[in-house]
Amino acid sequence: MSGSDVRVRSMTERELLDAVVEIAARLGWLVHHDRPAANRRGQWATHIQGDPGFPDLILVRPPRIVVAELKRERGVITPQQRAWLEALASCGIEVHVWKPTDWLSGAIEAVLHGAR
């Protein structure tokens, strides 16, 4: 197993999120991410009103809007997440599902630099 394989398998969704947010901010994107918070019982939740499955990141740098769902390397999109991504894409929004391999390959950075 190569070093990059180990990094891909061990990279958490949170580490991927932090990396994407950092580079997006450096490149002049406005960034939105809803963070979960602990309730009084110590349980973590992201409180929403509306339909579940909303994407992890909304990135805006006019004239582009990029919506990204982030997953661990073996993570799977839920049906609710897929519904949101498909609906946003059908409205002309640029939609991506990013995993650690996309980060390590430079694909995410390429999208944020301007390649689609």
Image: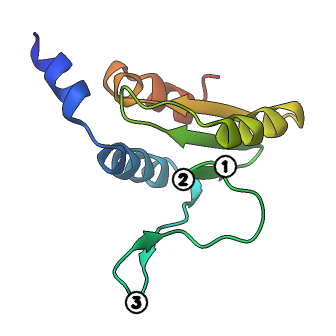
Q: Can residue 33 be seen in this snapshot? A: yes
Residue 95 percent coordinates (x, y): 68, 33
Q: Which amino acid does label 2 sit on?
A: Gly
Q: Which of marks 3 and 1 is nearer the N terminus?
A: 3
Instruction: Report, in whole angstroms, how far the alpha carbon at label 3 lies from the one at label 1.
Output: 37 Å
Position of 94 with respect to 10 (left or right) is right
> Which one is earlier in the sequence, the residue at label 2 or at label 3?
2
The circle on residue 28 is 2
**Residue 58 at x, y percent in the picture:** 63, 52
Residue at horizontal 72%, vertical 37%?
85
Element type where label 1 sits in the image: strand
Residue kind at label 1, given as amino acid type: Arg
Q: Which sits in the foreground, 106 or 69?
A: 69
As drawn, 2 above or below 9: above
Q: Under tag 3, what secondary structure? A: loop
Decide: few, some or many residues near mark 1? Use Cα within 10 Å; few <14, some 14-19, many ≥20.
some
Q: Which mark is residue 2?
A: none
- Relative to 55, is 103 above or below? above
Quadrant in which the C terminus appears:
top right
Near-viewer residue (88 or 62): 88
Closer to viewer: mark 2 or mark 3: 3
Callout 3, which amino acid?
Answer: Arg
Looking at the rendered structure, which numbered label has been put on residue 40? 3
**Mark 1, residue position:** 61
